[in-house]
Image: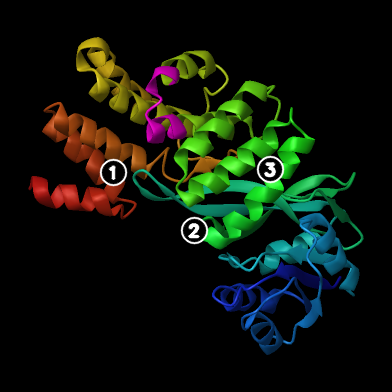
Amino acid sequence: MRLSLVMIVKNGESTLRRCLESAAKYVDEIIIVDTGSTDNTKLIALDYQSRVFDYEWTNDFGAARNYALDKSTCEWSLVLDADEYISNDCREALTNHLHSVPAIGKVKLIDKFMGKDGINHEQTYISRLFPTNCRYTGRIHEQIVSDLPRHKVDIEIQHDGYFQKEKSSRNVPILIDEILDHPEDPYFHYQIAKEYRGMGNHEEAYSHLSTAYSKITRREGYAPSIIINLMYSIISTGHLEEGLHIIESEQKFMWNSSDFYFVSALFLLELINSNLEIYGELLPLIEDYYLRALEIGDNEQEGSVIGTGSFAAHHNLGVYYEVTGSINKAQEQYRKAAFYNYEPSLERLKELK
């Protein structure tokens, strides 16, 4: 079975080489469809013996990706964007998938974004490895249409596109059109909120996450992520009055989500600091929520942020113990976080010696 790397690109010279370097060794051909680059994107693509095609952009990612798939000569296709790259050795996983029962391969996408406590990494699973005769639908955040089963494949893809303001400014108008066309679909509100978060526009992100939250049925795979991101947005914007109701309403649904308990603890700290007299009695819940996050641990749930069930929770619990005067307990938690080489905990341990 032969495999194509299939990409659509525009002005990707800053990241394309990194992407191609990570993937070229696994594929039999590289298809690059350029939608109007004015930089050295196409020259970089040619360095990797890519087959490069020009395509007139029509504000439709699905159509552009289908055009790229039309150019593939291989039975299977792997789809990447220029701001992504493969970060693990996936040769065996690719080989096994291509020679097993036909299925859509879901790869782990690790999104890098700026959170309130610094850079965070959110993981999701997306369909990126499939028979080339499959096709996309949707103008943005397009989806593969297929009746084939979907299997997770051990391929890790790093993505830092939410740091690129130009990309977000291109995506937002398309997402607005999708929202106008599908006003009851929470998915596009969820996706545009991610774009606004990357742009630092937390009020717009909050507005769209609130709308998405009001429309979810909780049968959506991304529903937990909407709830968690709304809690972070509430913290970022100071709309604290809503957070307690969400925590109370969603604990049963989110019982196995370390991210939910982690962000709930962060929220409680903000709430208590906003009015100690009214909310001070909630302080012990911060410890309870971090302990619950650690009990659940890091997992493969859709939209989970790496560390909320391990090093980040240990560190924050250490901070809680430190400010409440339990220094020995704080040091114990910092040591557990330091096991992961978590720099903030390593620094606190030095200072507490």
Q: Is residue 236 magenta?
A: yes
Residue in the image at 61% along x and 27% along y: 211
Tell me the mark number nearer the camera, choosing from 1 and 3.
Answer: 3
Amino acid type, mark 3: Ile
Task: Point out the stretch of residues depicted in magenta.
Answer: 232-242
Q: Is residue 66 above or below residue 257?
A: below
Mark 1: secondary structure: helix
Measuring from the top left, give residue 205's x and y in whole percent. 52, 38
Identify the image quadrant of residue 36.
Answer: bottom right
Measuring from the top left, give residue 302's x and y in whole percent. 60, 39
- Few, some or many C-alpha atoms within 10 Å of disc 2 (few <14, some 14-19, many ≥20)? some
Measuring from the top left, give residue 161's x and y in whole percent. 56, 59
**Mark 1 vs mark 3: which is more N-terminal?**
3
Amino acid type, mark 2: Phe
Measuring from the top left, give residue 201's x and y in whole percent. 47, 44
Q: Which mark is residue 163?
A: 2
Residue in the image at 43% along x and 21% along y: 243
Instruction: Write down the residue under mark 1.
Output: 336
How far apart are labels 1 and 2 at the CA level? 31 Å
